[in-house]
Image (tube, grey):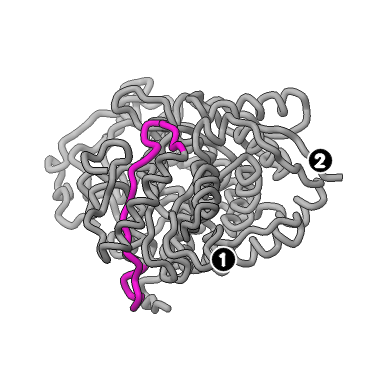
Amino acid sequence: MAKEMELSGCAASAQAARMAKVEVICSYPIRPYTALMMELAKMVANGELDAEFVYGEGEHAQLSVVAGASAAGARVLTGSSGVGVTYAFETYSPIAGGRLPVQMMIADRALDPPGDFGSEHTDAMSCRDQGWLMGWAENPQEAFDNSLINYRIGEDHRVLLPQYVCQDGYFVSHIPGKVVLPEQSQVDEFLPPYTLPHPLDPKHPVSHGPQIRPDQGTVMDLQRAQAMLDAPAVIQEAIGDFNRIFGRNYSPFVEEYMTDDAEMAFFIMGAHTMTARHAVKHLRSQGVKIGLVKLRFLRPWPTQEVAEALSKFRAVGVVETSTSYGGAMRGGNLLHEVRASLYDVPQRPLTTSFMAGLGGEMVPLKEFYYMAEVLAKMIKDGKASKTVYWVGFEAEA
Amino acid sequence: MFIIPKEKEVPLGCITPAPVTEQTMMITGNWREYRPVIDQEKCNLCMNCVVYCPDACWQLNEAEDEVVWNAKYCKGCLICANECTTEALSKVYELDFEDGVVRLEKPF
């Protein structure tokens, strides 16, 4: 029987790792993700999980340990937060280039500006272009589910890419929510055992990560790009199987909420989606034609799906929880990709972005109401006068 | 779809069969500035050079009972000389040799 529990995002991710039967785990403490390792250490100590638990001497070591273990044919898990994520940066490209399906749980945390410990997407977003699959969970249940889903996709031989399985620090990682733990047999049906085409094996010696010539570099980049291009079909397949086996109702790439007949919409990912839903529901009761589109995979970016979902609105407000200082939109990262996705659409909506929830601040309902007002004004004026609004800091209302 | 020309093909993730014999794609002997030179009289066959060489450029010749240096791939890092227990290895400037390679004359 599947059983229902109250779990934090970190505890939910640990349960997913247990049910995925991970074989090698490497830890190094930094909050808020550390709670994941606390849970896993208890499971290993209590004999609930048969895994090698290695203490890394830093995040660079964490990623190096799991890369080696993954190359040897073990299903692996590591994780980090904030500056821990960026400390390991050097390892991300070779892991993806070596086609090792390492899974890294990121409970995100602001990068030091200096010394912030709140949730913000910037840490993981800084690593988004290295060839890792990537997406955010809205709640502990989705954190649990995304872990299993990402192992399945990343380990598929048509993909073979590592995965950042992200959740907002504190808002997801530490606030308990309802999590339905499935039967082990369901997980086993969904997630086949991990195999690598060319594992390290003394009987058949191979070299991983050799020096290559410059003219081989393009080909390796092309291989990695191709894997990302091939991933969406595998994601579709995996989500279909997941929904069937676990009785869920996920859309593979973007989820829509109250978008029927909506004139405007929030575009958002991660924990604050929950508040945004309440805001949409409330605004709807007042007759505002607003909806919400939630992004489930940031990499590969679902260009087509985003274009289709957003082109039916007149105005879209992108909620940014990360920074891109000096970028084309002068705010966060998401609006760049949203606008690029919409470029070839004949009837484009007006788009702008809202900097909200930076440094771990809450995004309260009233901020979403403010965003809705800005969107309504954009529709009335027939133009987006700015590409970014720093919510709560704008001189003009 | 992309086309990768035959001569440019690279295995998945560049994971290759381990070279049990010498590979011929990248000769690194011309990177050397100094050459480790062995004094066989002083060598006690401790095998440190064999173990420590990152490029397997010292091998034991069991028939002759001596360690043999590989000029073709030795990059001249001199880790062997550093780890030698009997000071049998010394560093000699590459261009002092008749067959001394000119460093970086052709990188690959």
Residue beneath disc 1 = A158
- Give amino acid for label 1: Arg
Q: For marks 2 and 1, give the CA distance.
A: 33 Å
For the residues carrying marks 2 and 1, which lies nearer the camera in this image? 2
Crowding around mark 2 (Cα neighbors within 10 Å: few <14, some 14 to 19, many 20+) is few
Nearer to the camera, A395 or A171: A395
The question of residue A138 being in magenta is answered with no
| Residue A313, placed above or below residue B105 | below
Side (left or right) of A157 relative to A83 = right
- Image mark 2: chain: A
- Give amino acid for label 2: Lys
Nearer to the camera, A62 or A331: A331
| Residue A53, placed above or below residue A262 | above
Q: Quadrant of residue A355?
A: top left
x and y percent of residue A317 in the render?
37, 55
Residue beneath disc 2 = A3
Q: Quadrant of residue A143?
A: top right
Q: Quadrant of the C terminus of chain A?
A: top left
Q: Residue furthest right?
A: A1
x and y percent of residue A126 in the render?
35, 44
Q: Residue at x 15, y 43 (%)?
A: B97
| Residue B61, placed above or below residue B43 | below
| Residue B36, placed above or below residue A350 | above
Q: Residue at x 50, y 52 (%)?
A: A286
